[in-house]
Amino acid sequence: MSNECLQIDVCEKSFENINEKIKVSNNRLKDLENKIEEVNSIKNVLVELQLLTKLQREDSIKRDKAIEDMNRNQIEITNTLKTLSENLNKTDINVDKLAEKVDINNIQLNKKVDDISNDNIIKLSTIGKYLFFGTLGSGMTILLTRLLGN
C-alpha cells in the first residue's frame, strides 16, 4: 500500500492547484471572449467603412461624369453664344449697309420726283403765252369769220 499512497499524494498535489488554474483559465477565456467581441465589432466597422468607401467612389465617379457633362454643355453653349453674337454683328453690319442703300435710293427717288415735278410745272409765263395766243387766235377766227361771212 505504500506505493498506492505515494501515488495518491502525488495526485492530490497535482490537483491541489487545479481549481485555481481553472478559475484563472476561465478568467482568461472571458478576456479572450471580450477581445473576440471587440475584434468582431472592429471587423463590422471595417466592413461598413469598406461599403462607405465603395459608395463614395461610385458617387465620385457619377459626380465627375456630371461635372464633365456640364462642362461639355457649357462649352457648347459658349460656342453657340459666340456664333449668335457673330451673326448678330454681321446682321447689324448688313442692316447698316441696307439702311445706307435705302437712304441713297430715297435721295435718288426724291431727286426723280423733283425732276418729274419740275417737268410737270407749267410756268405762269407759259400759261400767259398760251392764253394770249389762244385768245388772239380765237379773236382772229371770230373776226375773220364775221368778215368773210358777211
Image: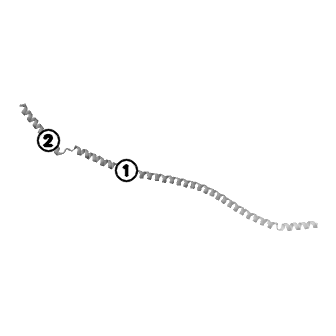
Tell which tag, 2 or 1, sits nearer the viewer: 2
Q: Is 135 placed left or right of 85 in the picture?
A: left
Marks 1 and 2: in contact by CB < 8 Å? no
Looking at the image, which residue sits at the far left?
150
- The quarter of the rendered structure image containing the N terminus is bottom right
Report the amino acid beneath label 1. Lys
9 vs 124, nearest the viewer: 124
State the image coordinates of residue 68 (x, y, percent, origin top left).
55, 54
In this rendering, is residue 33 above or below 139?
below
Number of the label disc, if any, that sits on residue 131: 2
In this rendering, is residue 79 above or below 29?
above
58 vs 135, nearest the viewer: 135
Report the amino acid beneath label 2. Leu
Number of the label disc, if any, that sits on residue 97: 1
Callout 2: SS: helix
The disc, 2 or 1, on the residue closer to the chain's N-terminal end is: 1
